[in-house]
Amino acid sequence: MLLIMPLSIAYTAPETRDFKSSNISTLLYIKNPEKTILTRFKWDILIEECMINNQEALGEYYINLRNKHIEKYHDGLKYSYEELWLLSKIIEAEAGMNWLDDYIRVCIGEVVLNRVESPEFPNTIYEVIYEEGQYHHVKYDMFDDVIPTEKSIETAQRLLNGDRLINNKSVVFQANFPQGSGVHESIYDELLGYTYLCYSNNLEIYLQTD
């Protein structure tokens, strides 16, 4: 199945169609009447700036404040600085070319998170990425040198905030060749060729857990 699907067509966030100007993160906190509370959109910007400027300690401080806010108001998903950093890096490594649109970036990150939730794979982002033989940049000792760009960080934030495009937890493979029990979707790029998003070999596991 050949599919070229720009993000503007493939994805519509609740109550807005422009992700760049109205981040989905904002929607989860905008209803809070307390003006003294930062919206998660502001947290995301502060954290993103820390990552771009290599300010890890400050970034962890902002994420801790963000997570405490979520604990208090029960209206979001918590994640760590390391999880955001690693997910941003793998998205950059796999789809960091500046001509690629957000659609493939989100799909690549979503496959990582599908693996984290799957009983077939390790249950942390770190272990999924560093599992032997799974990702090219890790296999050839290039991953530590990857520096995520703004696009990749924003995509990772979007995913860790709960956004999804594939919406199928059994899609746990992403590569330039078909594998697993079948192809969920193939995405074509003139320079990179096909990227295949494929189903697990053990679909019955996901039927039981869905």
Image: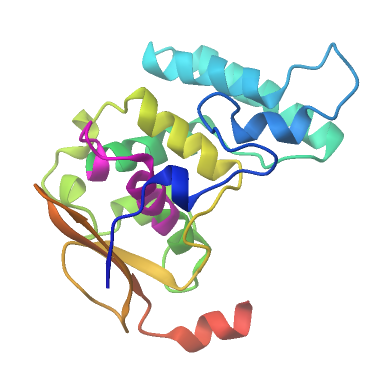
Q: What is the span of residues highlighted in magenta in the rendered image?
A: 94-111
Percent position (x, y) of residue 152?
A: 37, 33
Q: Quadrant of the C terminus?
A: bottom right
Q: Give the image location of residue 38, x and y in percent.
A: 74, 17
Query: Where 55 sits versus 108, above or below?
Result: above
Does 125 appear above or below 19? Answer: below
Q: Is residue 200 left or right of residue 18?
A: left
Near-viewer residue (172 or 165): 165
* Quadrant assignment, res 148: top left
Position of the N terminus, as image quadrant, is bottom left
Q: Position of residue 141 (x, y in %)?
A: 14, 42
Q: Is residue 154 above or below residue 95?
A: above
Q: Quadrant of residue 45?
A: top right
Colour pattern: rainbow
Is 169 situated left or right of 28 in this image?
left
Tell whether position 109 is magenta: yes
Residue displayed at 27% across by 26% down:
147
Q: Please identify the residue farthest to the right as the structure is shown.
A: 33
The number of numbered discs placed on residues in the rendered structure image is 0
